């Protein structure tokens, strides 16, 4: 490059640097920053951000309820796309704030980080603690109207995109009404009179469509869910939701729809509302409290922020309940504000729970059959303890630290240890109950947790070996398994055969290319009323789980199943039907995805064989029937056709009475056999019936039998 070119580049760079000066810097005043970067305050500008704005206004009313001043909150979704929140709290202060010279209403709705939630003001525990909620909603609204009932009067003020002023509503109350902003000074108007004992706040606003997406809308279902949740967490508070929009597909489609939620219980009632499976334990209520210190800026008497060491109190309120299922549902809250992404309180809850459960398992190692040798490998992990758990974890403290204004993650570090200690102490006390119903529940819980641990370890071992090793290559598969040669899962079939006697015939009848055989000894364990540990220790149940190769319970992976079809091949009598029921109970409880995918079948062996008599050298012909009614109908049909048949009609009492050709033709050959697919069209109803017929409660089963006794066909009893 020439010297002149180098000189030109240096001059250009110097010119660019001198052209960039302080006058290029922008300073966003007041609510301008919110409108410029709304995502920093409400997360997004779609429906989630729209709902977040509504939560900010509702949370201010809930804070009044937490402080003991509000008993009723009403949320109205108006037909003109506005939303209104009403409460009967103390009302926003209407007197003049001395440092700004503005009324309390204008300060709350126009000044960021303004409110009474700093430095131990009027609220002890709140959800809205940053002081930006109401002002942010105001900044992102095309219009916001607020009315306050206080000291015998109704006070009102309106805002247009965060700026106070007056709307001309002579042609109707809309965001497009003519607006005159205040110029010389703001005015909080008195628009009515009320009883001096009456107080409250009403906020109605229209979201600014210059900010939010045109498709953004308020979700009625989400609003009702949040209202119900808050009513659970604030006992005695009534929350009414009214939808006047008449939107298609909503409860208010045919007209205004209103529902009110009010509950007198706390987290225990909340947990009972959330659960969906049968119980292993009752809902256990765990509480505790702890203190910690932190340095925070506090307003002094001159209105200046000064750092001060303050002592905080953190109250912990937890409800836990384990069920027979495997899903985990843990809801966490800080001052009734949901924290869906957890935080330090969620981490403390898991740590305290795991520590208490591990201690209880160690104390009961002998009963749970965990030897000192196995203690190192058989260690309870978090997922084992959380299986089937439904829990609500709430903490209340002043000025919690959240990660961002959306308040989805609690960041106050000291809360973790306080929650962990409260949960550990409370759960240990329950698990160490010396007698009574509590002891039975504690034992059932530990059985479930240890069973989950062993299932997880078994699944881990299964993943370490090849999917398609036969019994000679893998010691994990039972020696009695007669595997097939095909590696094609879609073609392969596993026949679960009743008894060793039928196994010999089935080996000759099967197609060894794609049909595998696993014999079982009679009736397997009734897993509906047995613990997970007993199920895993049962030889027949363990063999079935190992052979299918997809795990069980929470760890079951449908894609890992080694066979495309699992076929139960039992005798066509009452014992065979009982065995099929026990097998179905095992599949339904611990391998349900296999049933839901339609990969479990019942073979249909015949009950009778009719030998047709021919003439000369014509080969013998046989007809098979599968019920007494079908036998009678077949014989009548043969008589009408003048077909001769042997009077000695064979009645099969078991699969072992058939020869290989007969078994193949009637039950195993895909070209001739009949299979009944097992489906789950209504899982809840099916689970209820399994519990009735196979569960540990005898009384309901006895009532069921007595009620249906008159309808029993005695001829169907194979005795």
Image (spheres, rainbow, N blue to C red):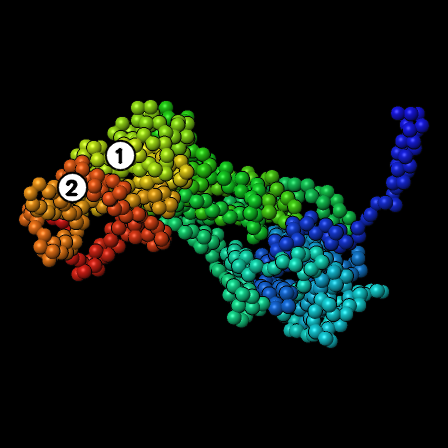
Q: In the rendering, which numbered label is found on residue 695?
A: none
The disc at residue 511 is 1
Quarter of the view holding residue 432:
top left
Whether label 2 touches label 1, CB < 8 Å: no
Closer to the camera, 172 or 422?
A: 172
Q: Nearer the viewer, residue 391 or 141?
A: 141
The residue carrying pointer 2 sits among few (fewer than 14), some (14 to 19) or many (20 or more) residues within 10 Å by Cα, namely some
Which type of secondary structure does the marked residue at label 1 adopt? loop
Secondary-structure class at tag 2: loop
> Which of pointers 2 and 1 lies earlier in the amino acid sequence?
1
Residue designated by label 2? 654
The quarter of the picture where the N terminus appears is top right
* Residue 507 on image: x %, y %: 22, 32
* Residue furthest bottom in the image: 170
Where is residue 300? Give x, y as percent.
75, 49
**Residue at horizontal 25 percent and vertical 29 percent from the top:** 480
From this view, report whether residue 183 is shown above or below residue 390: below
Q: Position of residue 713 (x, y in %)?
A: 16, 57
Residue positioned 39% across, 50% down in the render: 277
User: Callout 1: 10 Å neighbours few (<14), some, many (20+)?
Assistant: some
Q: Quadrant of residue 157?
A: bottom right
Horizontal side of 361 relative to 6 (left or right) equals: left
| Residue 468 in the image: above or below residue 215 | above
Percent coordinates x, y for residue 492 in the rendering: 33, 36
Residue drawn 10% across the image and 58% down it: 640
């Amino acid at each position: 490059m020439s010297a002149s070119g180098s000189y030109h580049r240096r001059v250009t760079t110097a010119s660019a640097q001198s052209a960039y000066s302080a006058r290029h810097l922008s300073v966003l005043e007041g609510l301008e920053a919110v409108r410029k970067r709304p995502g920093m305050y409400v997360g997004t500008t779609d429906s989630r951000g729209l709902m977040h704005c509504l939560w900010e206004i509702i949370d201010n009313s809930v804070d009044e309820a937490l402080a003991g001043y509000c008993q009723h909150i009403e949320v109205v979704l108006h037909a003109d796309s506005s939303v209104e929140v009403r409460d009967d709290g103390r009302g926003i202060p209407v007197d003049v704030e001395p440092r700004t010279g503005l009324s309390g209403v204008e300060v709350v709705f126009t000044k960021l980080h303004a409110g009474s939630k700093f430095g131990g003001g009027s609220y002890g525990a709140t959800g809205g603690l940053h002081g930006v909620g109401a002002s942010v909603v105001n900044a992102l609204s095309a219009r916001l109207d607020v009315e306050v009932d206080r000291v015998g009067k109704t006070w009102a003020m309106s805002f247009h995109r965060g700026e106070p002023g007056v709307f001309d509503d002579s042609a109707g109350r809309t965001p497009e009404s003519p607006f005159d902003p205040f110029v010389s000074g703001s005015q909080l108007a008195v628009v009515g009179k009320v009883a001096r004992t009456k107080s409250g706040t009403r906020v109605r606003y229209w979201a600014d469509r210059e900010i939010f997406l045109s498709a953004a809308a308020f979700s009625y279902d989400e609003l009702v869910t949040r209202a119900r949740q808050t009513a659970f967490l604030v006992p005695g508070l009534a929350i009414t939701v009214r939808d006047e929009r008449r939107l298609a597909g909503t409860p208010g489609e045919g007209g205004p729809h209103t529902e009110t939620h009010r509950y007198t219980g706390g987290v225990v009632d909340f947990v009972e509302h959330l659960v969906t499976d049968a119980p292993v334990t009752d809902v256990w209520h765990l509480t505790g409290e702890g203190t910690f210190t932190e340095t925070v800026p506090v307003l002094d008497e001159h209105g200046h922020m000064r750092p001060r060491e303050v002592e905080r109190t953190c109250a912990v309120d937890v409800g836990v309940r384990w069920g027979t299922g495997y899903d985990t549902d843990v809801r966490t809250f800080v001052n009734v504000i949901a924290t869906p992404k957890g935080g330090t309180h969620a981490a403390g809850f898991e740590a305290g729970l795991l520590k208490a459960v591990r201690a209880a398992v160690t104390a009961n190692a002998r009963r749970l059959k965990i030897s000192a040798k196995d203690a190192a490998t058989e260690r309870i992990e978090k997922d084992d303890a959380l299986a089937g758990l439904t829990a609500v974890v709430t903490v209340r403290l002043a000025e919690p630290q959240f990660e961002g204004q959306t308040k989805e993650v609690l960041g106050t570090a000291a809360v973790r240890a306080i929650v962990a200690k409260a949960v550990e102490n409370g759960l240990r006390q329950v698990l160490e109950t010396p007698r009574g119903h509590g002891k039975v529940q504690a034992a059932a819980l530990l059985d479930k947790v240890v069973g989950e641990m062993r299932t997880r370890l078994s699944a881990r071992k299964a993943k370490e070996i090849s999917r398609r090793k036969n019994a000679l290559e893998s010691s994990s598969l039972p020696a009695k398994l007669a595997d097939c040669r095909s590696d094609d899962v879609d073609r392969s079939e596993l026949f679960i055969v009743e008894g060793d006697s039928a196994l010999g015939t089935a080996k000759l009848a099967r197609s060894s290319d794609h049909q595998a055989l696993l014999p079982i000894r009679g009736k397997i364990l009734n897993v509906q009323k047995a613990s997970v540990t007993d199920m895993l220790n049962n030889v027949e149940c363990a063999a079935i789980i190992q052979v299918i190769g997809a795990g069980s319970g929470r760890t079951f992976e449908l894609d890992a199943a080694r066979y495309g079809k699992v076929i139960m091949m039992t005798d066509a009598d009452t014992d065979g039907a009982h065995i099929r029921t026990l097998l179905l109970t095992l599949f339904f409880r611990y391998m349900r995805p296999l049933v839901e995918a339609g990969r479990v079948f019942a073979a249909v062996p015949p009950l009778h064989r009719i030998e047709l008599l021919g003439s000369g050298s014509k080969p013998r012909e046989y007809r098979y029937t599968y019920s007494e009614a079908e036998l009678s109908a077949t014989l009548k049909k043969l008589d009408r056709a003048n077909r001769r048949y042997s009077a000695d009609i064979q009645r099969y009492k078991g699969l072992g009475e058939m020869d290989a050709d007969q078994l193949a033709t009637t039950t195993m050959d895909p070209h001739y056999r009949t299979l009944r697919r097992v489906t789950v069209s209504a899982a809840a109803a099916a689970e209820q019936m399994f519990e009735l017929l196979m569960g540990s409660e005898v009384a309901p089963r006895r009532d069921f039998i007595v009620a249906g006794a008159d309808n029993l066909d005695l001829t169907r009893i194979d005795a």
